[in-house]
């Protein structure tokens, strides 16, 4: 019996070991993905302020090196881009003609891409020409996906000329709701969409869009019905936010749990760890190609995917540039001087200013609610340029919103390219890249509203953080909404305080893009914080093109050239023939002062009209509530009396 028992035990153990061997021998089904988003025309490495210090990051040739290293390990790595591949450096000056950005995504080997809001900055004709020329180039380009363009609604109303142009371009480039890609034997469905906030950032959108969540949900249902997809990925230009109720890609993950991965663009968020909702992973690696996203997934027994590894890889100075890719970038960049900068009397490598002032990172503009020197210098440059045109002392206030400032200024030489990168948005009515400056008139009461927009709305909409020249204010973050600004006043060119007169008109200079975004601020405040730009005679401006600042020859005053010329005007303090950065930017000037106090006196001092409106509403609500209680008590007494 002992021998029989031993034999049985050996048999069971052998069977178990055999089973383990068979299971261990089964190859894991895995997928590797690398991705970028919000590269914003940053084809070359660039100096920027990151983690509080000047660094040189990014560059498509370095991205190519990292991708080639990964492809050597796994040739079936899936490469994705989540939009906003354009608008951010001088290469965008040839966006329409050369389609440089999308062609270089093809050079990287990107399999699938989508569109972001900044692809629409050059209007319908710009994006159509870019797509058509990308196809005409014959270079490899990514497959394009976007599932929430509402062609059905537009066709029912009759397509406009711009919509017909875009529909033809979309068809030419092969834009689809989704594409199927096979990697390592795994069938992957890739869809894409543009989010609600992203759509709101398109000036005068030429297309209509479906609700992104509902569109993705319908697309995924179609994929489930028609395709044998092992994995579903969404390349989203929706983004994530700290507030979960605003975090569009988190809302998407919860609403469409069938998604396995969401590559999240638009908000320039860098996630060091994936956000997980159910079996959906959300990943994001920031802007400008400073980081390359890398993740590996393994299929589990339930048929979903487990994230085994996720890493934002730094594209730093230690990464060697791929020579062939760099040569292609150089060839495209060489066109910029002759085709664009020559008309401004500049070259891309020209040193405008030597800088030994530490400017804050661009990310601080939205993350920190205080005076910041990067915002101040741009506002100052608007005043300088406008007064060169209109005369000394003509400008009362200049405004630079955080959402328009795209990069910071590093230590060392600041070149034309560096300045352009800091304000690289849009195109003018003249068809020349770069948004122009505009001059409008606001009342003193409206300038107080400007301060309140920064003090109240910008905590909810960080792109509306405002940095100004001429307009100063104190604010208390502990006060009630719409009543946080406590002291708003002007400081003139002689550094003298001036009180605002509510019904007096003041000349205000800002960029054209900001004027188009005023509606978003009004909506965010439910119409309470409304600003109505006017001409000098008080007439309301109907078309902001009429307020564009132009020189005697009719040339638009571009925002980025205002910054460049301001830096060139600075004093050469070391006598080497190159201007030096003004030392005043090394310290705060009291433009925006925080009064972080919960003292009752500080909470109610200098009340504005909204304070009394809100107090009145509170009193009314209390009165109604007390009235209801008294009425109920009266009814109860009557009932008791009858009984």
Image (cartoon, grey):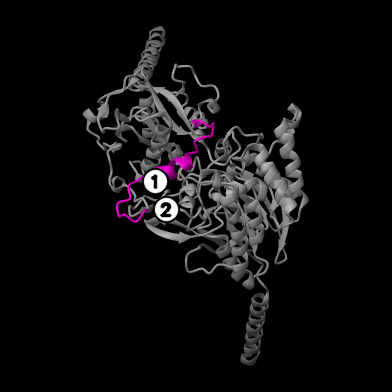
* Marking on residue 296: none
Q: Residue at x 60, y 48 (%)?
A: 339
Q: Is residue 91 above or below residue 55?
A: above
Q: Residue at x 62, y 48 (%)?
A: 94
Q: Is residue 208 visible?
A: yes
* Marking on residue 414: 2
Contact check, label 1 and label 2, Cβ < 8 Å: yes
| Secondary element type, mark 1 | helix
* Residue toward you, 186 or 552: 552
Q: Is residue 292 above or below residue 542?
A: below
How busy is the neighbourhood of tag 1: few (under 14 within 10 Å), some, or many (20 plus)? many
Quarter assignment of residue 413: bottom left
Main structural element of the magenta stretch: helix, strand or loop? Answer: loop
Quarter assignment of residue 387: top left
Instruction: Give coordinates of residue 255: x percent, y percent.
Output: 60, 44
The residue pinned by badge 1 equals 567
Mark 1 or 2, nearer chain start: 2
| Secondary element type, mark 2 | strand
Residue 234 within the segment the image draws in magenta: no
Q: Residue at x 36, y 13 (%)?
A: 630
Residue 572 within the segment the image draws in magenta: yes
Q: Is residue 529 left or right of residue 609?
A: right
Q: Is residue 191 left or right of residue 317?
A: right
Highlighted range, magenta? 549-577
Instruction: Give coordinates of residue 329: x percent, y percent.
Output: 60, 59
Separation of residues labelled 1 and 2 (CA atoms):
9 Å
How busy is the neighbourhood of tag 2: few (under 14 within 10 Å), some, or many (20 plus)? many
Q: Where does the N terminus fall, quadrant-wise? A: bottom right
């Amino acid at each position: 019996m002992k021998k029989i028992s031993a034999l049985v035990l050996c048999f069971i153990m052998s069977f178990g070991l055999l089973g383990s061997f068979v299971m261990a021998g089964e190859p894991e089904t895995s997928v590797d993905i690398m991705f970028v988003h919000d590269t914003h025309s940053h084809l070359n490495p660039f100096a920027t302020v990151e983690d509080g210090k000047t660094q040189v990051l990014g560059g498509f040739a370095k991205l190519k090196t990292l991708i080639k290293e990964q492809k050597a390990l796994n040739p079936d790595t899936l490469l994705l881009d989540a939009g906003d591949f354009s608008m951010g450096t001088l290469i965008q000056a040839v966006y329409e003609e050369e389609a440089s950005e999308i062609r270089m995504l093809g050079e990287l080997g990107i399999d699938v891409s989508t569109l972001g809001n900044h692809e629409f900055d050059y209007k319908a004709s710009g994006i159509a020409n870019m797509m058509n020329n990308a196809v005409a180039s014959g270079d490899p380009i990514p497959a394009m996906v976007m599932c929430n363009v509402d062609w059905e609604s537009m066709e029912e109303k009759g397509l406009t000329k711009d919509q017909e142009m875009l529909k033809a371009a979309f068809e030419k480039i092969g834009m689809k709701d989704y594409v199927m890609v096979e990697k390592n034997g795994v069938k992957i469905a890739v869809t894409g969409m543009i989010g609600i906030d992203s759509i709101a950032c398109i000036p005068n959108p030429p297309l209509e869009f479906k609700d992104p969540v509902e569109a993705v949900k319908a697309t995924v249902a179609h994929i489930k019905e028609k395709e044998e997809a092992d994995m579903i990925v969404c390349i989203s230009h929706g983004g994530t936010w700290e507030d979960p109720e605003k975090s569009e890609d988190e809302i998407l993950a919860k609403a469409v749990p069938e998604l396995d991965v969401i590559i999240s663009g638009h908000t320039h968020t860098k996630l060091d760890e994936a956000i997980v909702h159910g079996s959906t992973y959300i990943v994001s690696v920031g802007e400008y190609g400073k980081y390359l996203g890398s993740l590996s997934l393994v299929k589990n027994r339930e048929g979903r995917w487990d994230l085994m590894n996720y890493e934002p890889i730094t594209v730093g100075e230690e990464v060697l540039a791929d020579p062939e890719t760099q040569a292609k970038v150089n060839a495209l960049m060489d066109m910029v001087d002759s085709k664009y900068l020559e008309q401004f009397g500049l070259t891309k490598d020209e040193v405008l200013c030597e800088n030994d002032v530490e400017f804050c990172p661009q990310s601080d503009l939205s993350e920190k609610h205080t005076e910041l020197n990067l915002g101040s210098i741009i506002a100052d440059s608007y005043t300088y340029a406008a007064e060169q045109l209109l005369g000394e002392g003509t400008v009362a206030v200049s405004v630079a919103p955080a959402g328009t400032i795209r990069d910071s200024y590093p230590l060392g030489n600041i070149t034309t390219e560096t300045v352009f990168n800091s304000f690289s948005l849009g195109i003018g009515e003249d068809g020349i890249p770069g948004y122009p400056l505009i001059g409008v008139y606001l009342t003193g009461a409206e300038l107080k509203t400007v301060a309140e927009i920064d003090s109240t709305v910008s905590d909810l909409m960080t792109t509306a953080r405002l940095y100004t020249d001429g307009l100063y204010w104190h604010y208390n973050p502990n006060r009630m909404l719409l009543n946080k600004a406590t002291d708003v006043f002007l400081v003139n060119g002689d550094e003298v305080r001036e009180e605002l007169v509510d019904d007096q008109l003041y000349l205000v200079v800002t960029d054209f893009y900001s004027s188009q975004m005023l509606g978003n601020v009004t909506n965010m405040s439910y119409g309470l914080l409304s600003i109505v730009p006017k001409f000098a005679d008080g007439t309301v401006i109907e078309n902001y093109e009429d307020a564009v600042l132009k020189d005697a020859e009719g040339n638009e005053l571009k925002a980025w050239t205002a910054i460049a010329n301001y830096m060139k005007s600075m004093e050469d303090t070391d006598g080497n023939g190159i201007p030096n950065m003004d030392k005043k930017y090394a310290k705060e000037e009291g433009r925006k002062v925080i009064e972080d106090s919960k003292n009752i006196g500080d909470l109610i001092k200098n009340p504005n009209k909204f304070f009394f409106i809100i107090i009145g509403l509170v009193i009314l609500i209390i009165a109604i509530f007390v009235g209801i209680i008294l009425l109920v008590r009266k009814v109860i007494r009557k009932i008791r009396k009858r009984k």
